[in-house]
């Protein structure tokens, strides 16, 4: 695991975006794995800039997002589908039909999960996956637990995640209690992974991910077993390393 420390979120965004940019330039029909939350926003802002400057063309790119809240429709402002439209897709030229976000309103979530993993496999697998990390060490919505979940599946959010995500809602009661999330197995299949972490609240989780034992109690620690992971952290997030 390669750890790179930068001065702030903007510098991290530029560095992480350059990984995606290199990927898309080398392989215009790349399969990109995307995340929501605060962490990837500077990366997405930079990708939009590079597209507007004529440097990046996303017309052949396919995207797969990590996760979605259960029960929120695409037009719900807090749905991850909506977030992606607002923060990335509206600013680049990826065709709408190439965009995939797990469906949080599917009747049969188990089936939706299986189909989602099959779609990723049929597309050829993810070339580069961006991740954030939860204060509790989660990646996507894989919360600390006793066993690493493999495929895309339904998850119950922990209290810690509900509290962390309340900032996007009116109050904590509005935060959905369940989500659909790519599993650890789905994430580990990506050929390259970049993880972005900023702020002191992430320091313990970053320490567990990089230096702790590989355990589902800190889901991000599994990334120690992946051959191509780069962590982009600011000084506060890297302060315990
Ligand atoms: C989002 C996701 C989550 C976030 C994590 C960090 O798609 O999968 O694992 O990456 O909760 O969120 P932020 O970046 O808001 O601190």
Image (tube, rainbow, N blue to C red):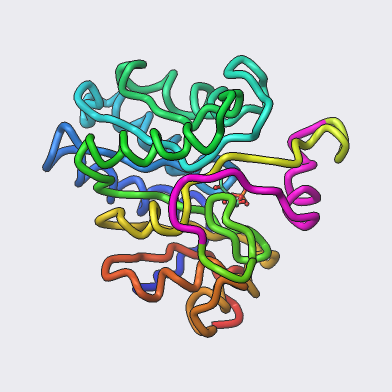
The quarter of the picture where residue 53 lies is top left
The residue nearer to you, when weighing 205 against 42, is 205
Viewer-side residue, 141 vs 45: 141
**Quadrant that contains the N terminus:** bottom left
Residue at 52% across / 74% down in the picture? 209
Q: Nearer the viewer, residue 138 or 196?
A: 138
55 relative to 39 in the view: left or right: left
x, y percent for residue 192: 28, 57
Q: How many marks?
A: 0
Residue drawn where x is 17% and y is 32% of the image: 29
Above-or-below relation of 38 to 108: below
Magenta stretch holds residue 152:
yes
Q: Farthest left residue? A: 26
**Residue drawn at 11 percent across, 42 percent down:** 26
Task: Residue 193: give x, y in percent of width and height.
Answer: 34, 57
Residue closest to the eye, 5 or 194: 194
Q: Which residues are magenta?
A: 149-169
Q: Position of residue 213 (x, y in %)?
A: 52, 84
The image shows residue 87, relative to residue 172, as above or below, that is: above
Which x, y percent locates residue 130?
Answer: 41, 50
Horizontal relation, residue 96 to residue 38: left or right: left
């Amino acid at each position: 695991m390669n750890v790179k420390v930068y001065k702030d979120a903007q510098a991290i965004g530029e560095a992480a975006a350059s990984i995606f940019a290199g990927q898309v330039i080398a392989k215009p029909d790349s399969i990109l794995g995307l995340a929501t939350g605060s962490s990837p926003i500077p990366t997405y802002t930079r990708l939009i800039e590079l597209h507007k400057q004529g440097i990046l063309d996303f017309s052949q790119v396919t995207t797969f997002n990590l996760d979605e809240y259960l029960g929120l429709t695409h037009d719900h402002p807090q749905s991850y589908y909506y977030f992606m439209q607002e923060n990335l897709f509206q600013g680049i030229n990826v065709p709408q039909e190439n965009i995939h976000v797990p469906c949080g309103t599917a009747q049969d979530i188990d089936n939706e999960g299986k189909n989602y993993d099959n779609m990723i496999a049929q597309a050829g697998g993810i070339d580069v996956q961006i991740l954030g990390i939860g204060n509790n060490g989660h990646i996507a919505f894989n919360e600390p637990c006793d066993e690493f979940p493999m495929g895309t599946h339904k998850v119950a959010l922990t209290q810690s995640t509900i509290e962390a995500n309340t900032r996007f809602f009116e109050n904590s009661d509005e935060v959905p209690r369940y989500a659909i999330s790519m599993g650890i197995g789905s994430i580990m299949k990506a050929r390259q992974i970049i993880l972005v972490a900023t702020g002191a609240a992430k320091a313990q989780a970053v320490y567990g991910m990089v230096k702790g034992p590989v355990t589902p109690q800190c889901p991000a620690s599994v990334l120690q077993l992946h051959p191509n992971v780069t962590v982009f952290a600011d000084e506060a997030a890297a302060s315990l390393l």
